[in-house]
């Protein structure tokens, strides 16, 4: 019987359906007054009917309004839901009595419309509302207090993605507390973009007090502040917390891990601090964790829970560190993992291969090491970025097998090596491939299906790839970016091949072994693609490619080629006048074709190191970087040049023959940071306004001109100068006192002028001064300043030679010069050199230089390494003893105290200067024996203690035995090798001869001068009149310099008598001169040596390297400059003084 009862329960509905009787469902019919209100509402709203998908379809001829789009009715025919989102409504709602009369409304959605008014107060009449969504609808101003009457609200969304800057939506009066105090039923609160700044840090207490059942809290970009109060922990039902883009400046509370329902936690860009609670990673239901852009937030990931629910993790731009745990494979739902710009290290877990749902992976800008894991099982992967790490190993076909949906792959800036597998170019969906700055070698093989490949970007720059560029690269029809610069590709590339790439917008072939044939570009049948960027530096171009028809080009680099003749005037029309970057440096260009009308959009204009003569080309007013240095320009600077450089940050005309005066219009360049007018024939005085406007000027170089007068005392408070070079002019007077205002000064060079002043003690407290050169002036007095512990603490090079300084050497001076004392971070900063960076986003910098004198040779160091230190006090009138504190300068490289009146013994502490390579104490009154400690200076390459009153036996040492007798002559009491007189047992014969000095004449000095003059004449005459002797000198001078200065990576070649130029290595070259083949093997076996770790053995004619010493190389032998520099490639210039 019971079975029959159940059977009837199933059959009754069946018979009802067949009979058409409706018992459980009542068809809702639109009530007339409800329809009337809807039609009235439609008539008052202003919207674009062509874009409307709901309102435009409301038809008054249709009786059933409950079926209209966006309208929902209850069983009685009352409208209970109105969804008019994204209807382009712009007005008509302010006083819409029809809308506010829909008393049965429970849901109202007006999101994504175009209102520009305040929220209508009339909405508060809809007291049955449970769901109200006014998000991104354009509402402005204060949220009306009347909305707090909607006490039945469960969901309230007033968020906006783009708050109005002038009238943002805000809760000020009332504030958040008063607004929600009656909304106890509220479960979901979205106030993103609403100004809650009036709430200050009390928002947590307000929410926890009045909204105990809250499950969703979204307060992104609300201007709330921290800390996150403990009262928020009372909201135990929270499942979504979004607080992004608020300046919370606080730590993440540990109690977040107690929210058992928490599925989403986003705290990006909140200025979070401290350590992130690791327990939050263990919340089993957590699906989304967003913490990006909190650089002060640290933490690590120890473990992921088994069967974790995380789908998205974003920790980018935080300070998370440590290694990734192998348990990351527990996150089987993980689809997006963003860890870029953190401090993660160690290997990437191989278990990541088990993440089958992975779609997006970004580990860029970290310290990951080891091999790249295989991702064959991550078949959904579309984005892979592992760039800028320390990854090593080979790439194989297996790495990419099965990645049929991969669209973007960047592995750049790692240490990956080996040969590139052709399969990487054959991935069926891959559009962007970036493998730049690795160590890939060998030839790139041809790949299949190039014509149908979806690739639009191939970036292989900065590797060691060689051979010909595969022809298949020029068959990828969709290719937009092809970057192959800084490799060893060889062969000839005809522009006909490039013409096939009709979609190409960026082409970079610079610095390979390529020869680009531009002849075909002049053919009428040739169709060059419309490029925006073209870089063909060092491509052996002999003429300009025909770019007349380029309408989109904004960047053109044809530098370091063999292009001669004129700069064609059609070049200014490239890109329709939109050309912004033009680099024609290091060519053989001779003049600018007329008419000259530079593009008004040109920002970078680089013509340096050509043969351009005549007048200075007037730069366009848009120019920011202008470099005309190292040309043959020989006229004066136009008087109104400042008007043409109104926006310029860099202006250099160094190394020309420009005459005339410095025009005052240069003072009108408001944004100028670097001004280099050095090595010209400028005359006149310095315009005072030039120094007065130095609040933005970082580099001022007027060295080696014909300027005269006094240096204006007009350096302002807030002076921004870091480099001031006024050397090799004829300035007179004193150093200006206002120079003390230049608190950022790093390099001050006023050498070789006629200044008459005392030592600049006003700069003694500078925290930045590294290089001070006062040589060859008439400075006088002693070096006594008010010594403090911070005096000259960063000084690394000081040259005050050839002045009239007197007095004794202050021991405290030497002990304060911390820049000459080895620090714990020297290894870390060894590759740093003094430079001035400007235009930071473009990596431009100005390279500081300094000229030193070593053994009669002037050495111009274009790169001043931070580890290079030097003291030159020679040719003054110092007396007294050499302080023992000189031994504290443990990183000192050069010490020259010659031609003074110093007396007493050579301090034994000099033996502690283990980095010392040049020591000159000659022509003083030093006495006593040469300390045996000098024998421990194994890197000493130059030693001169001649013409003193030293006596005794010359210490024995491997390095000391390499010096000739000239280093010790003029000391009657000295004996032993390398002097000819041997030491005798009679001690009386070892005592020094009495020193007799005549107040009127120093005959010893006179005889020395005559001797030097005769010796110089005997040495020079064969070089001037005997060609074979000149060649012999050149050859051995070059070999000596190679041995003495290999750490700088220079090759020395002599261009004309008396001048040696060092050219930076970019790659190994085979010397043309083969007449010394018999000695080549021996030189080749010497290996790589550096100044600090190698010494010269003149007897064996070779360099000896200390394997325990660390060499600090200035640059890799195969590296290339990644950014333009103001300096020329001539890194060292030596002028021999006769």
Image (spheres, rainbow, N blue to C red):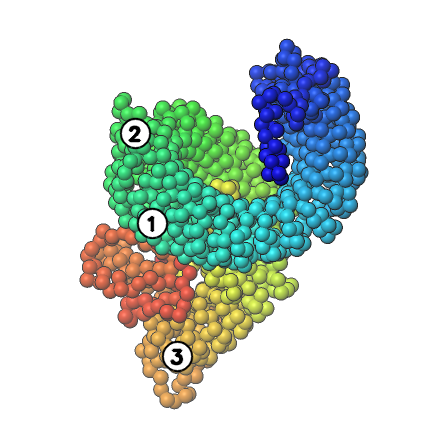
Please name the residue shown 77% across and 43% down the image. Answer: 210
Left or right of 1026: which side holds 78? right
Say which label, 2 or 1, has the lower sequence index: 1
Of callouts 2 and 3, which one flags the residue occurring earlier in the amino acid sequence?
A: 2
Q: For mark 2, what is the residue?
A: 500
Q: Position of residue 484 (x, y in %)?
A: 34, 41
Query: Residue at left 45%, top 64%?
Result: 894
Quadrant housing residue 518: top left
Classify the position of the N terminus by image quarter. Answer: top right
Residue 507 screen position, x and y as percent? 36, 35
Tag 2's secondary structure?
loop
Task: Please name which of the two marks, 2 or 1, marks the residue nearer to the observer.
Answer: 1
**Is 490 placed left or right of 591 in the picture?**
left
Is residue 127 among the parts visible in the rendering? yes
Q: Is residue 870 visible?
A: no
Q: Of label 3 and label 1, which has the lower sequence position?
A: 1
Residue 398 tag number: 1
Q: Are marks 2 and 1 in contact (CB under 8 Å)?
A: no
Q: Which residue is farthest top?
A: 61
- State the SS at label 1: helix
Find the distance from the CA under tag 2 to the CA under tag 1: 32 Å
- Would you identify the image quadrant in which residue 1015 lies? bottom left
Q: Which residue is mark 3?
A: 955
């Amino acid at each position: 019987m019971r079975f029959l009862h159940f059977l009837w329960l199933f059959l009754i509905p069946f018979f009802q359906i067949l009979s058409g009787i409706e018992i459980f469902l009542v068809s809702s019919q639109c009530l007339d007054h409800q329809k009337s209100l809807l039609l009235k509402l439609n008539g008052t709203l202003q919207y674009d009917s062509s874009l409307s998908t709901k309102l435009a379809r409301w038809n008054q001829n249709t009786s059933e309004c409950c079926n209209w789009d966006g309208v929902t009715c209850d069983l009685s025919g009352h409208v209970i839901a109105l969804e008019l989102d994204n209807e382009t409504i712009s007005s008509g709602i302010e006083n819409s009595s029809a809308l506010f009369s829909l008393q049965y409304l429970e849901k109202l959605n007006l999101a994504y419309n175009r209102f520009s008014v305040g929220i209508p107060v009339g909405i508060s009449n809809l007291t049955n509302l449970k769901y109200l969504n006014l998000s991104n609808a354009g509402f402005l101003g204060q949220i009306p207090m009347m909305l707090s009457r909607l006490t039945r609200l469960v969901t309230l969304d007033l968020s906006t993605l783009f708050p109005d800057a002038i009238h943002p939506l805000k809760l000020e009066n009332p504030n958040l507390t008063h607004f929600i105090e009656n909304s106890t039923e509220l479960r979901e609160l979205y106030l993103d973009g609403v100004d809650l700044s009036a709430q200050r840090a009390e928002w947590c207490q307000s929410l926890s007090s009045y909204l105990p059942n809250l499950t969703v809290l979204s307060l992104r970009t609300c201007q709330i502040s921290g800390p996150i109060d403990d009262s928020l922990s009372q909201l135990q039902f929270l499942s979504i917390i979004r607080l992004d883009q608020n300046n919370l400046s606080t730590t993440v509370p540990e109690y977040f891990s107690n929210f058992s329902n928490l599925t989403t936690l986003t705290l990006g860009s909140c200025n979070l601090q401290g350590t992130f609670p690791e327990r939050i990673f263990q919340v089993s239901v957590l699906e989304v964790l967003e913490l990006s852009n909190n650089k002060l937030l640290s933490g690590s990931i120890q473990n992921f829970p088994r069967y974790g629910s995380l789908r998205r993790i974003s920790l980018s731009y935080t300070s998370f560190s440590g290694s990734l745990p192998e348990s990351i494979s527990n996150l089987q739902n993980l689809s997006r993992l963003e860890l870029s710009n953190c401090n993660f290290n160690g290997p990437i877990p191989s278990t990541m291969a088990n993440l089958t749902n992975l779609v997006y992976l970004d580990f860029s800008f970290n310290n990951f090491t080891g091999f790249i894991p295989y991702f064959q099982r991550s078949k959904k992967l579309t984005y892979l970025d592992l760039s800028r790490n320390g990854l090593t190993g080979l790439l194989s076909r297996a790495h990419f097998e099965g990645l049929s949906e991969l669209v973007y792959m960047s592995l750049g800036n790692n240490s990956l090596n080996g040969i590139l597998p052709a399969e990487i170019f054959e991935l069926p969906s891959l559009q962007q491939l970036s493998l730049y700055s690795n160590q890939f070698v060998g030839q790139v093989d041809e790949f299949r299906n190039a014509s149908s490949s979806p690739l639009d970007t191939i970036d292989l720059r900065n590797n060691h790839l060689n051979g010909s560029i595969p022809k298949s690269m020029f068959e990828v029809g969709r290719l937009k970016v092809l970057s192959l610069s800084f490799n060893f590709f060889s062969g000839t590339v005809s522009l006909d091949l490039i013409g096939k790439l009709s979609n190409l917008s960026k082409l970079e072939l610079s610095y390979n072994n390529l020869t680009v044939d531009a002849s075909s570009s002049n053919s009428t049948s040739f169709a060059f693609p419309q490029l925006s960027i073209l870089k063909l530096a060092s491509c052996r171009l002999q003429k300009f490619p025909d770019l007349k028809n380029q309408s989109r080009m904004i960047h053109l680099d044809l530098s370091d080629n063999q292009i001669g003749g004129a700069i064609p005037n059609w070049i200014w029309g490239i890109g329709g006048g939109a050309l912004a970057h033009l680099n024609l440096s290091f060519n053989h260009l001779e003049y600018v074709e007329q008419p000259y009308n530079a593009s008004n959009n040109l920002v970078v204009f680089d013509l340096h190191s050509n043969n351009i003569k005549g007048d200075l080309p007037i730069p366009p007013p848009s120019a920011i970087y202008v470099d005309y240095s190292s040309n043959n320009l020989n006229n004066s600077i136009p008087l109104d040049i400042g008007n043409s450089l109104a926006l310029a940050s860099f202006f250099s005309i160094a190394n020309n023959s420009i005459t005339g005066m410095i025009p005052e219009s240069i003072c009108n360049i408001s944004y100028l940071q670097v001004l280099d007018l050095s090595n010209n024939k400028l005359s006149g005085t310095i315009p005072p306004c030039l120094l007065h406007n130095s609040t933005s000027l970082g580099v001022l170089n007027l060295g080696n001109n014909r300027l005269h007068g006094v240096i204006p005392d007009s350096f302002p408070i807030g002076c921004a100068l870091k480099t001031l070079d006024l050397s090799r002019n004829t300035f007179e007077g004193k150093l200006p006192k206002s120079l003390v205002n230049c608190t950022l000064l790093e390099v001050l060079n006023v050498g070789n002028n006629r200044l008459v002043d005392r030592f600049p003690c006003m700069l003694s407290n500078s925290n930045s001064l590294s290089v001070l050169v006062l040589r060859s002036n008439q400075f006088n007095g002693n070096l006594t300043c008010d010594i403090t512990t911070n005096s000259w603490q960063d000084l690394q090079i000081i040259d005050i030679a050839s002045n009239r300084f007197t007095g004794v050497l202050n021991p405290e001076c030497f002990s304060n010069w911390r820049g000459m004392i080895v620090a714990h971070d020297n290894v870390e900063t060894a590759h740093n050199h003094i430079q001035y960076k400007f235009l930071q986003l473009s990596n431009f910098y100005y390279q500081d230089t300094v000229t030193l004198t070593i053994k009669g040779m002037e050495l111009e160091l274009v790169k001043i390494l931070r580890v290079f230190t030097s003291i030159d006090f020679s040719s003054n009138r110092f007396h007294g003893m050499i302080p023992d504190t000189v031994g504290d300068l443990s990183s000192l490289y050069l010490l020259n105290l010659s031609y003074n009146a110093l007396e007493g013994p050579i301090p034994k502490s000099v033996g502690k200067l283990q980095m010392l390579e040049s020591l000159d104490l000659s022509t003083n009154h030093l006495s006593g024996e040469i300390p045996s400690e000098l024998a421990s200076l194994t890197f000493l390459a130059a030693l001169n203690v001649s013409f003193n009153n030293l006596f005794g036996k010359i210490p024995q040492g491997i390095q000391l035995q390499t010096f000739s007798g000239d280093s010790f002559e003029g000391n009657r009491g000295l004996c032993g090798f390398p002097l000819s007189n041997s030491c005798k047992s009679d001690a009386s014969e070892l005592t020094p001869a009495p020193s007799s000095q005549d107040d009127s004449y120093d005959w010893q000095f006179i005889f020395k001068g005559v001797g030097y003059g005769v010796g110089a004449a005997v040495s020079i005459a064969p070089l001037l009149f005997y060609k074979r002797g000149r060649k012999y000198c050149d050859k051995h001078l070059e070999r000596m310099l190679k041995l003495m200065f290999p750490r700088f990576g220079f090759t020395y070649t002599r261009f004309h008598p008396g001048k040696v130029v060092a050219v930076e290595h970019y790659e190994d070259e085979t010397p043309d001169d083969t007449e010394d083949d018999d000695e080549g093997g021996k030189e080749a076996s010497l290996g790589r040596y550096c100044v600090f770790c190698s010494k010269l053995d003149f007897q064996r004619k070779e360099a000896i390297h200390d394997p325990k010493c660390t060499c600090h190389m200035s640059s890799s032998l195969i590296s290339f400059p990644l950014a333009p520099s103001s300096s020329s490639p001539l890194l060292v210039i030596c002028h021999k003084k006769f």
